[in-house]
Image (spheres, rainbow, N blue to C red):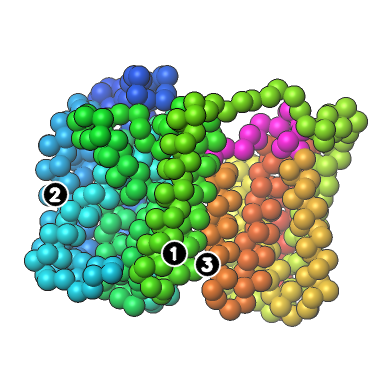
């Protein structure tokens, strides 16, 4: 529960600050202007990092103890925020930025005494060597994330996936303080990504990307050196993923081309994908899936030999960069055809009609409505906390309806999403008590709802619901969560619950956006479900 509170608090703070900073950005010069190296064609505010940092840090400074380690981390984050905002407003030189990066890392290593003492394949190293290596490694991670921030949602999405893995590893180690830190940073990123999905309204800037790099480096060292030393020392290269090899490849290309090491160029992975003809959208998704593969490998092989983990990382990255180089030398460009597939043509010519779309919309709303009512009536015993939650929602609805009706629609939408979470939990209890027959029946219902959602998104031109990289990121995180739960007992129920929640959320959002006249029915069923739960809790 603490983790959920921190996550939501960080997300809310971030989502509140970012729009304010977008309005302020032009007045303080924090706007990213287009040039030949960049992919955007309009000036974009680069102030999102302020929302990420404040959103992530504000909840945890009130929650976690200020010991030397945590104090050093917060100090380092604030130093990078100051230097990052300074750079975003007036373009600092590389050496000044390095001063800020070293100032942020040195207290963590030399004051809090956090450093790498065991290297993969090598074993234990001296304290002096370990501290020097740690400073250089974390500064390198800061720059790796900073350089990966080249497309909308890219740096934030990759960092979010890495944090999911790191949070899970802290959970396994019973290190709940660091787990809370991970969740708070994830909340700050989620709040920012609301405005950074393509086409972005805001960039995170150096203030955000350097903070994310420091956080990942800090957590990776703490995880493997203090929290769970039994983990493979090579594991960080897998869960930190593509940014590490990307920045090394960029430096190699710059040096071999006789260019300045630190002068920005268009030879990052995302630039190379764009030059091959992939769209902004496709490039981000491609990199997400590479990152996901590496992170899933980290989860599956967390206690394996260093050589195996390094071999996996080496094999994946060599394959990716070899393919890029081969395609570039062949002069390959993505060819696009405007012709639709046979299935698309059949649906467009035979099934595509307003009446069909309305029927499918009614089916989604009706199915979710019946699920709400059926599960709330049929589930077994549940925690009394759910009764308190139901009482709160019903009381809020009565108060708002009587005194402030203009907010009843907002409360209705909120109640629908909260009810979806509650119903998935109760459904888990129902299946656990009722057995395989109910499970198979519900699988059919949820799969049919999923196909209905996909049908409307694909073919109803009136639906303003274009799948964005953010949607794919949610999908990837669901896959990561399933991979995580595959290492714990009760796998099927957890994984199924995650997928069901995803179907319900997208179904509710689709009905809300399209207004298929089913939203009010769903809202009524949500309030009715809470009345049922409240009565059952009282009885």
Residue 423 shown left or right of residue 120 in the figure:
right
* Local secondary structure at mark 3: helix
Q: Secondary structure at mark 2?
A: helix
Marks 1 and 3 in Cβ contact (< 8 Å): no
153 on left or right of 73:
right
Magenta stretch, residue numbers = 456-469
- Is residue 467 in the magenta section? yes
**Which residue is at 50% across, 55% downward?**
293
**Residue 406 shows which numbered tag?**
none
Judge the density around disc 1: few (<14), some (14-19), many (≥20) Cα neighbours within 10 Å. Answer: many
Q: Position of residue 503 (x, y in %)?
A: 69, 53
The residue at the point 34 percent across, 61 percent down is: 236
Left of 210 or right of it: where is 22?
right
Where is mark 2, residue-wise?
Answer: 102
Q: Earlier in the sequence, mark 2 or mark 1?
A: 2
* Disc 1: which residue: 298
- For the point 18% across and 53% down, the residue is 136
In magenta segment, residue 11: no
User: Which of the 4 image quarters holds residue 444?
Assistant: bottom right
């Amino acid at each position: 529960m603490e983790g959920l509170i921190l996550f939501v608090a960080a997300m809310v703070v971030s989502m509140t600050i970012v729009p304010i900073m977008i309005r302020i950005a032009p007045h303080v010069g924090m706007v990213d202007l287009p040039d030949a190296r960049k992919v955007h064609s309009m000036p974009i505010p680069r102030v999102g990092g302020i929302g990420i940092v404040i959103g992530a840090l504000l909840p945890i400074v009130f929650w976690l103890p200020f010991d030397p380690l945590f104090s050093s981390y917060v100090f380092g984050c604030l130093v990078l925020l100051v230097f990052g905002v300074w750079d975003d407003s007036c373009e600092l030189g590389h050496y000044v930025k390095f001063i800020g990066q070293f100032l942020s890392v040195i207290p963590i290593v030399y004051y809090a005494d956090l450093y790498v003492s065991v290297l993969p394949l090598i074993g234990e190293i001296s304290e002096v060597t370990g501290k020097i290596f740690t400073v250089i490694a974390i500064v390198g991670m800061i720059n790796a994330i900073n350089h990966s921030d080249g497309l909308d949602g890219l740096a934030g999405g990759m960092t979010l996936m890495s944090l999911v893995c790191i949070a899970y590893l802290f959970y396994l180690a019973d290190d709940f303080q660091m787990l809370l830190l991970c969740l708070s940073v994830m909340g700050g990123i989620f709040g920012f990504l609301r405005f950074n999905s393509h086409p972005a309204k805001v960039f995170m800037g150096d203030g955000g990307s350097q903070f994310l790099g420091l956080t990942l480096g800090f957590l990776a060292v703490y995880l493997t050196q203090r929290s769970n030393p039994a983990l493979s020392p090579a594991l960080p290269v897998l869960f930190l993923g593509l940014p590490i090899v990307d920045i090394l490849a960029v430096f190699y290309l710059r040096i071999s081309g006789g260019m300045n090491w630190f002068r920005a160029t268009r030879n990052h992975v995302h630039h190379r994908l764009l030059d091959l003809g992939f769209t902004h959208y496709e490039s981000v998704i491609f990199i997400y899936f590479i990152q996901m593969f590496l992170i899933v490998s980290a989860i599956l092989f967390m206690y394996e030999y260093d050589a195996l983990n390094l071999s996996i990382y080496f094999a994946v990255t060599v394959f990716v960069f070899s393919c890029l180089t081969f395609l570039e030398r062949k002069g390959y460009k993505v060819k696009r055809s405007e012709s639709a597939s046979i299935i698309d043509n059949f649906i467009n010519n035979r099934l595509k009609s307003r009446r069909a779309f309305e029927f499918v919309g009614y089916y989604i709303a009706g199915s979710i409505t019946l699920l709400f009512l059926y599960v709330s009536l049929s589930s077994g015993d549940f925690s009394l906390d759910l009764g308190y939650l139901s009482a709160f929602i019903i009381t809020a609805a009565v108060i708002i309806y009587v005194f402030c009706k203009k907010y009843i629609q907002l409360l209705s939408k909120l109640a629908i999403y909260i009810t979806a979470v509650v119903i998935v939990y109760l459904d888990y209890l129902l299946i656990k008590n009722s057995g395989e027959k109910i499970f198979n029946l519900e699988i059919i219902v949820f799969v049919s709802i999923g196909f209905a959602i996909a049908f409307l998104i694909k073919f109803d031109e009136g639906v303003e619901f274009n799948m964005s990289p953010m949607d794919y990121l949610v999908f990837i995180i669901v896959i990561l969560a399933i991979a995580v739960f595959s290492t714990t007992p009760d796998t099927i129920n957890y994984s199924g619950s995650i997928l069901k929640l995803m179907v319900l959320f997208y179904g509710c959002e689709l009905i809300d956006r399209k207004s298929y006249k089913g939203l009010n029915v769903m809202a009524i069923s949500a309030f009715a479900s809470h009345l049922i739960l409240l009565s059952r809790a009282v009885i």
